[in-house]
Image (tube, rainbow, N blue to C red):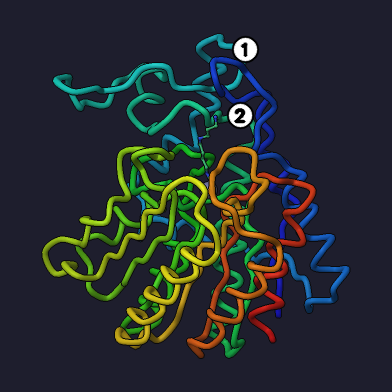
Amino acid sequence: MLTVYSEKHALHNPRGELCGGELVVPFECPARVEHILQRVKKVALGDIIAPGNFGIEAVARVHDPAYVRFLESCWRQWSAAGYRGDAIATVWPARGMQQRIPEHIEGKLGYYALACETAITRGTWEAARASVDVALTAQAALRDGERAAFALCRPPGHHAAADLFGGYCFINNAAVATQAFIDQGAERVALLDVDFHHGNGSQAVFYDRSDIMFLSLHGDPKYAFPHFLGYADETGCGAGEGYNHNYPMGPGTCFSTWGEALADACRNIRNYAPDALVVSLGVDTFEHDPISFFRLTSEDFRRYGATIARLDLPTLFVMEGGYAVDEIGINAVNVLEGYEG
Ligand code: Q9C
Ligand code: ZN
């Protein structure tokens, strides 16, 4: 299987993440993708290529133009305001307040942020641009006839909505790639999100659409981030009614339960008969993940890769989360090896 990778991911390397009232070393760190890349090489998964330079047009099909301008200019405005740390949101347009976009960068940050664990730094925009280029390059390989490809994206994307960043995400790589399939003539595309966290951004982007089915297996939002989306009764709206499937699961969920949810999701995908499948691949479902509560083993990843392969669809894997850094390479590549059979 082809892998697309850019070393520019390392340009996004925030100093800290607010967690449990402390500034800790960020869970979403550059070492994550380096471990995955090493594993891809070790098992000789296939060719590894650098991304091409895609313009902003494909990104603009999913994201709001003013949001894109904000991401692009945030660091400049933040430093111009005299701040010396990373750009972190500290105030939100909460219930009962105005939803106008403020002039001051502190207000803008809060307007566009969905959480405050995610810092914007000098190199964040360039890294996020490279990350979506990775996804679009892998998508183009499928367009040109590859059966499957692995976009080794960092930063991840599935929490980013049309005009929201957070949950370590800025540009929704998987959503942009999914939309690219449609723009190239696909009639239907399924976006299957197996990251531990609900893909709130992807769901929001496609919620009123019947040409994209979104399915997400994740920690129940009653107990897990992003806390405010991802319930089972969110089934889509308007023309999109019936094309959104959420599978929230509780603490301690093992592969027996998780695998049943995947089997049900696969039944829905089969009935939908899409032209292509995009997988938001997070391996934070791992039993030893430091911020999650599912109990999948390294072998389980191989097993479910094979389940996805049985859908027999052109498949684009887009890297999302996974924070057990020592095992992240084995777990992510196990899915791809399981898929290849
Ligand atoms: N104190 C992805 O997996 N909350 N994002 C962390 C730790 C944010 C996860 C809580 C989790 C974001 C792409
Ligand atoms: Zn996650």
Residue placed furthest toward the left = 238
Tell me the residue at 65%/66% (across/down): 52
Tell me the residue at 59%/87% (across/down): 147
| Residue 211, picture quadrant | bottom left
Marker disc for residue 121: 2
Tell me the residue at 36%/43% (across/down): 221
From this view, report whether residue 182 is shown above or below residue 255. Answer: below
**Where does the C terminus fall, quadrant-wise?**
bottom right
Tell me the residue at 38%/69% (across/down): 179
**Where does the N terminus fall, quadrant-wise?**
bottom right
Q: Secondary structure at mark 1?
A: loop
Name the N-terminal-most of marks 2 and 1: 1
The percent position of residue 45, horizontal first and vertical second, equals 78, 76
Q: Secondary structure at mark 2?
A: loop
Q: Which residue is mark 1?
A: 84
Left or right: 111 in relation to 47: left
